[in-house]
Image (spheres, grey):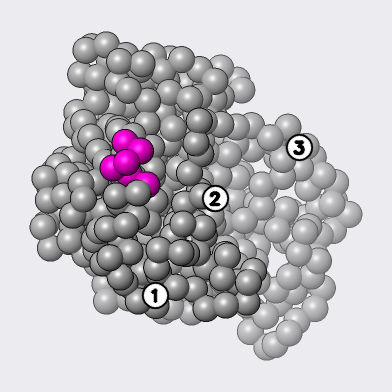
Amino acid sequence: MEAALAKDTPESNAPFLPEPTTVAAVGLDYGMLLDITLKTVYFGGRPSARAICDRICLPFSVMEEILDYLRRQELIEIVGSGGIIEQDYQYGLTSKGVSRTQEILEQNLYVGAAPVPFALYEKVVAQQSIAHLQVTPQKLAAAFENLVLDAETVEQIGTAVGSGRSVFLYGPPGNGKSTIAECIAALLSEEINVPYAIDVNGQIIRIHDPRVHLEPDGGMAHEKEVVGSIANIRAGRDRRWAISRRPLVIGGGEITLSDLDLRYSPASKFYIAPMQLKANNGVLVVDDFGRQLMRPEEMLNRWMVPMDRGIDHLVFQTGETVTIPFDVLLVFATNLTPSQLGDEAFFRRIRHKVRIGDPDTKLFKDILTRSAAARSLSYDEDATDYLIETYYRETGRPFRGVHPRDLLDLIEDFARFRGEAPQYDKGWLDRACRSYFVED
């Protein structure tokens, strides 16, 4: 039933999953394979056997038996050929096949890669677990090279990520908590296998999301390109799995409890994975924690079992419950004070707490220097001292890590409007600050 897991190959750093070569090795109910094949022919017009294999992501050695069976049952027939070999034969539905397929479509409209058996999915998630990550100071420095943070904060973040446990980022707004969460994902550079869909007791859950499961080069994965790639075929990989970077899923104030449950589509009649299932083997960020429509305690209660035991429970429309792996680095980011969110027992559930405070004068100047260099602006130390004295010390305004970027963006906006070259000097800073800061 389960394909054996082999060592990595040169084609990819993702664990190697060999392509099934028999119907039994696919690990799915025979009827499900028949149904998916009929729907593939129905929506494909006159697809060749090769095209059917590519769409279902199974080799001809498997699909040959399925196609022969459907022909013997007079559900499909050969309607043409694009070549002289069997893989070039083109298929169409018979009238009996059309009737049968329409009945199948009443059950669900899923067409695509054959689902992966749930038992194999559990095994692969465990093999790719974030618990196996090795976070070194060198990797940490590379991931955070574009951020200016004090050494202690960076070390705390690295320790938290290396543990694979939950992380709570808190502190004043505008100091890069959301950006830090994205940098954490950059630490997870290894490639992983992500199934397009899984089969749980006959129920299909679509997991792969091209917006989340990016190709190793950072681009969005397009299913047709990935499943039909020559590299995958040559490597002998199971094409029901996309090779992806470890996922980063970010949700903010819009998150509701229903977003954490299976989403059933009445139209398509199959399930879409919730955000935590899409984030398996990666990072899930709850941004603006405490600003959701639910109370913070409600959200934490929802995550309590997954954080403690590494499993989650999802419920189907039928009332049946499935226990799924929860292999996620869960990051809570908030600019609310901890006392607004919960008590000691509340925070004990979250292993690592990292305060992202305001930068000091040195760090603030470092950020300004980098921001100016990124925009090819000549940095002026006197202009910086003027900015700090006039708009921070005299007003009692705290430094924020985001201020340099925003102020220099405003300088460029003014310069563009005036048709002039932007300059980093007192006059341009005055224009930017008057526009940026709100005075009571």
Q: Position of residue 290 (x, y in %)?
A: 43, 23
Q: Which residues are magenta?
A: 391-396
Query: Which residue corresponds to mark 3?
Result: 267
Query: Which residue corresponds to mark 1?
Result: 377
The number of numbered badges drawn on the structure is: 3
Identify the element where label 3 is drawn: loop
Q: Position of residue 126 (x, y in %)?
A: 26, 44
**Residue at 19% over, 32% down:** 352
In the image as oriented, which residue stretches furthest toward the bottom? 84
Classify residue 393 by image quadrant.
top left
Rate crowding at label 3 as few (under 14), some (14 to 19) or many (20 or more) other CA atoms within 10 Å.
Answer: few
Instruction: Kindly identify which numbered label has been placed on residue 435.
Output: 2
Circle 2 or circle 1, nearest the eye: 2
Q: Amino acid at mark 2?
A: Ser
Circle 3 or circle 1, nearest the eye: 1
* Disc nearer the start of the sequence (2/3): 3
Apparent side of residue 237 relative to residue 77 in the rendered image (left or right) = left
Q: Amino acid at mark 1?
A: Leu
